[in-house]
């Protein structure tokens, strides 16, 4: 990818990775695949109930130790760039239904204090999207925050207007009706009455 403009500054010929700030990968499937890969030896613990976008969820806390991790954190540009592989932990919001789909994932890498980048925190939301006559669970929103010394940065992504394309499809870039996500799509709602934090989960 190449960026043409960033904060009103021309960046022709520069890659998106050279712009700086928070950059993330893996929202589509990579992070989830790593967490559930048997060789990762992920430790799972049920923590509480939660509600996202009207769906009751089981909230699980997970931990991946550094020796099994593929989570890399990079800082700076070559030839002076630094990179580490960090263990990580976070939460999984699993819809309480026979589908057992992931509606939210959080990732917090365990970064050594000596590394320049600190306080990395990623949240990825997934939701059902209509594509043609069918529904698919796809990324909805992602937010990555991190700190470098006294400077904090945030990368926020929204995926919108999923479409099914065919050979005779006409592609346009009109975003007049493309509104930002409302808070009820990204904020966790209180768990339903009777679903106490310490209750043993009962899956539908």
Image: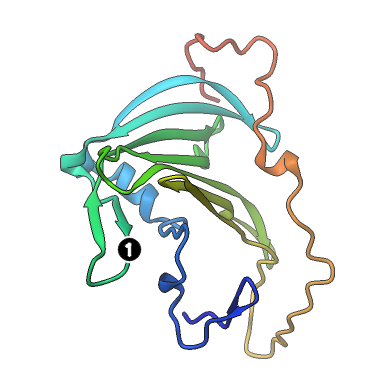
The quarter of the displayed image where residue 177 is located: bottom right
Colouring scheme, one of rainbow, by chain, secondary structure, one colour: rainbow
The quarter of the displayed image where residue 82 is located: bottom left
Image position of 80 with respect to 63: above or below: below
**Residue behind mark 1:** 76
Residue at the far left: name it. Answer: 67
User: Residue at point 73% right, 51% down?
Assistant: 181
The quarter of the displayed image where residue 131 is located: bottom right
User: Residue at point 42% right, 56% down?
Assistant: 29
Image position of 115 with respect to 93: above or below: below
User: Residue at point 48% right, 41% down?
Assistant: 105
How many C-alpha atoms fall within 10 Å of the one at disc 1: few (<14), some, or many (≥20)? some
Q: Nearer the viewer, residue 131 or 49?
A: 49
Total residue callouts? 1
Quadrant of image for the C terminus: top right
Image position of 38 with respect to 60: above or below: below
Picture coordinates of residue 39 (x, y %)? 19, 43
Picture coordinates of residue 6 (x, y %)? 59, 73
User: Residue at point 51% right, 34% down?
Assistant: 93
């Amino acid at each position: 990818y190449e960026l043409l403009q960033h904060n009103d500054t021309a960046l022709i010929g520069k890659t998106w990775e050279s712009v700086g700030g928070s950059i993330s990968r893996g929202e589509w499937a990579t992070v989830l695949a790593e967490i559930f890969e048997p060789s990762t030896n992920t430790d799972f613990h049920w923590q509480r109930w939660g509600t996202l976008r009207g769906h009751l969820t089981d909230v699980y806390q997970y931990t991946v130790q550094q020796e099994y991790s593929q989570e890399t954190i990079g800082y700076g540009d070559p030839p002076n760039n630094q990179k580490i592989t960090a263990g990580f932990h976070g939460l999984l919001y699993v819809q309480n239904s026979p589908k057992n789909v992931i509606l939210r994932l959080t990732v917090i890498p365990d970064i050594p204090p000596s590394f320049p980048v600190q306080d990395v925190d990623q949240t990825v939301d997934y939701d059902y999207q209509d594509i043609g006559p069918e529904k698919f669970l796809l990324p909805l929103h992602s937010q990555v925050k991190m700190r470098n010394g006294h400077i904090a940065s945030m990368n926020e992504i929204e995926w919108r207007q999923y479409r099914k394309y065919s050979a005779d499809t006409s592609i346009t870039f009109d975003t007049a009706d493309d509104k930002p996500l409302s808070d009820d799509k990204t904020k966790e709602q209180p768990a339903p009455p009777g679903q106490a934090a310490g209750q043993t989960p009962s899956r539908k």
